[in-house]
Image (spheres, grey):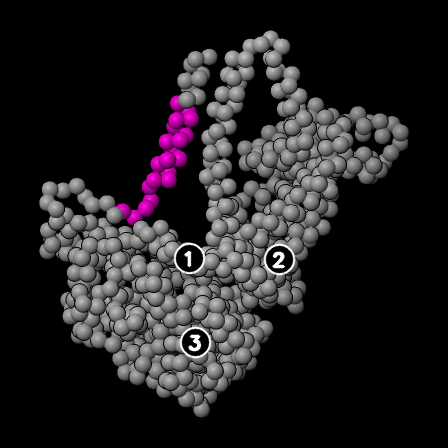
Amino acid sequence: MTDVAGDLTPRGGNATRAAAATAVNPGATDQATAWSVASGPRGRGASSNAWRKRLEIFFFVAPALLLFATFVLLPVVQAARYSVFRWNGLGPMDNFIGFQNYVMALGDTVFQRSVTNNLTIAVLSIAIQLPIGVLIALLLNRKFPGQTAMRVIVFVPYVLAEVVAGVIWKLLLQPSGGVNAFLEAIGLGGVTQAWLANSSVALWTVMGVLTWKYCGLAIVLLLAGLQGVPEELHEAASIDGASWWQTQRKITIPLLGPTIRTWMFLSMIGSLQLFDMVWILTKGGPDNATSTMATYLIRQGTERSQYGYSSAVAIILFVISFVIAGLFQKLVMNRDAGDDKPKQRRKKVSR
Amino acid sequence: MKRTAALRAVALGAAVAMIATACSSGSAGDDATDGSGDENVTLTWWHNSNTGAGKDYYDELADKFESEHPGVTIEVSALQHEDMLTKLDAAFQTNSAPDIYMERGGGELKSHVEAGLTKDITESAADTISAIGGSVDGWTVDDRVYSLPFSIGVVGFWYNKAMFAQAGITENPTTMTELYDAIEKLKTAGIEPISVGAGSGWPAAHYWYYFGLRQCSKDALEAATQQFDFSDDCWVRAGDSLEELISKQPFNTGFEATEAQGTPESASGLLANRKVAMELAGHWEPGVMQGLTEDEQGLGEDTGWFPFPEVEGGEGDPAAQLGGGDAWACSEKSPDVCVDFIEFLLASDQQKRFAELDMGLPTLPSATAFVAAPELAQLLSFRNEAPYVQLYFDTAFGENIGGAMNDAIVSVFNSNGTSQGIVDAITSAAALEQ
């Protein structure tokens, strides 16, 4: 069963591992605390040992913390500072304007449209990719000839570099491109479109490409989750006379819960920060129809040398993502911290 | 145990060293070379002629200047155009701009000057400035000159002569009515008339700029470009003219997402690959088209050019042209010899050779006769005879107001905006700047 994971680890490993880390996060924290208490050798009074341990921890954590502080925390703080100035990036920053940049951004119809687009993409991504992902994962979890090959094929779009995939789709979606040629060849000439140029269609086109690109991730994560559903339960269910469909519905999907919630979380954050695919396909156009918060930031901010304003937009984007992520953690992921039964099992099985 | 600890330390050290080197490289140097005399200076020069004869010629010029000025070393960086702009932006923000760089004038220059980044060369280059003449106006802030323009072109219609003949168009359109007539003839012949890169914004915006130039008197134009006074109703009429043009549906399918240049599907690519009959573009177009066809010829013999037609009833001079160009500037902290070098670049011999190599449209009047390509020579004659050449509005207004304006124009191209909307977008963006 681990063969697939083995196949995919070199490329998909990162995402999968990150997801797994998030999934077991609450448990992991518990574990860490338990471990440090247990191993704290206070009773023996070997305090030099404790110091040694602290030093060791510091030694390993410090470089990472330093990098994190330099490349994540510092820019965030700097952006917050820039965001209260009107500043074109040149010369001293001396035109303090308070929260005017924020007021401007929140009042700008294009920005509002970008936020709406982000939210639409976030909701639709989950609504479209979850059913597809679950269905395909269930199918691919059954044994059939060519199973491994199928799994690889399904995962290929996700492995392809975003830019490469974007450029290929862009060419296919040109008015005289492959998609329209295909539609005409199968007799659907009537639905041909300037897919990326029509401002009422462009967002849906982008949505389609995103689905194609990211379904693979959902499927692989869910497949990994399926490995954690113990075989005995299926056996027990079939002994009780449950059909395949009943087994999936009553046993597999509920046990997939933690994985699904983790995937939803990743998908949502990805949708809110969506930039590269949109940038390559449409640059947020035509006429801002596919603008997202991130492309808005570049187009209205940095490309216009409005560094104070773009910093304000960046902070708003940060706050929106942070709040939604926090709420999701609190309201949805929290459930996973309580019932860690399936998770522990899952871990045992997956090891 | 000892061994592993030591290994860890080595690994950590190596990682830190790698990060440190990664951070330290890459900034443009103000580092002078080690030398004996104290006259040794190094000039850094960024330009965008990064291929072919142009690159060789600039290298040759740098060598020549070095041999004429012992002690001067010129570090030449030939960059791809977009890369150069991005790097320049970053360099200005970190105050590490190269000594000699390309300046496009207008609002961009103004913000560089306000931040004290560009050298005032009014006195130090006085001779060359007077030799170039009126063209330096676009690089002047408060009567001080900051750069020497080496190439100025104008925007007009590039077209495919063979397609015009096929559609039975015998004379180049000189008025909008004639242009509409040509559009009809091309459509009847089954040819898409015009490609426009509305996805990139500015190519679409050029139409509105030209309608503004044709509709507005010189006074209204000056009030607008100098005080952002768009109260004259000619600016709304410019938008109306644009809407009229769009209503004839002359543009390529999917023009809303078409990019300006770079791919065969871009506006320039469509013209170069004979998919459309014409495109409104600047003097760079033949060069761009050559890069977009397999035989590297672009339209070759079929390349034609005509100026933007007259708009009936407009108050502007029908011979006025929209254009812009590139100039050499020295950054504020560059050594004085920098000014000598940009004057050297603008000297008569150099401008002649620049013209012969078709690298651009020389600004020095004595060099204009040496432009080799016939269409460019024709374009140049219109530039030289124009009563005034208006700098592209987006460049003139600066990135912020220019960006807001271009977005509003693109909305009109997408049938979402109005003539008044363009004017409103400009005035509200301008109000924020003041």
Q: Give me the chain letter of mark 3.
A: B
| Residue under label 2 | A115
Overall secondary structure of the magenta section: helix
Give me the residue at 44% from left, 17% from top: B5
Which range is magenta?
A: B10-29
- Between B340 and A52, the one lying in front of the other is A52
Please give the label number shown on residue B228: 3
Percent x, y of residue A127: 72, 50
Percent x, y of residue A112: 61, 61
Please give the label number shown on residue A94: 1
Percent x, y of residue A186: 65, 61
The three-letter amino acid code for the residue at tag 3 is Phe
Q: Give me the chain letter of mark 2.
A: A
The three-letter amino acid code for the residue at tag 2 is Val
Percent x, y of residue B118: 28, 60
Give me the residue at 66% from left, 56% from top: A120
The three-letter amino acid code for the residue at tag 1 is Asp
**Same-chain status of marks 3 and 1:** no
A83 left or right, relative to B365: right
Give me the residue at 56% from left, 35% from top: A14
User: Against A241, is B213 above or below?
Assistant: below
- Between A103 and B208, the one lying in front of the other is A103
Q: Nearer the viewer, mark 2 or mark 3?
A: 3
Q: Residues within 10 Å of mark 2 (few under 14, many from 20)?
A: many
- Between B257 and B31, the one lying in front of the other is B31
Q: Give me the chain letter of mark 1.
A: A
Q: Quadrant of the C terminus of chain B?
A: bottom left
| Residue B139 quadrant | bottom left
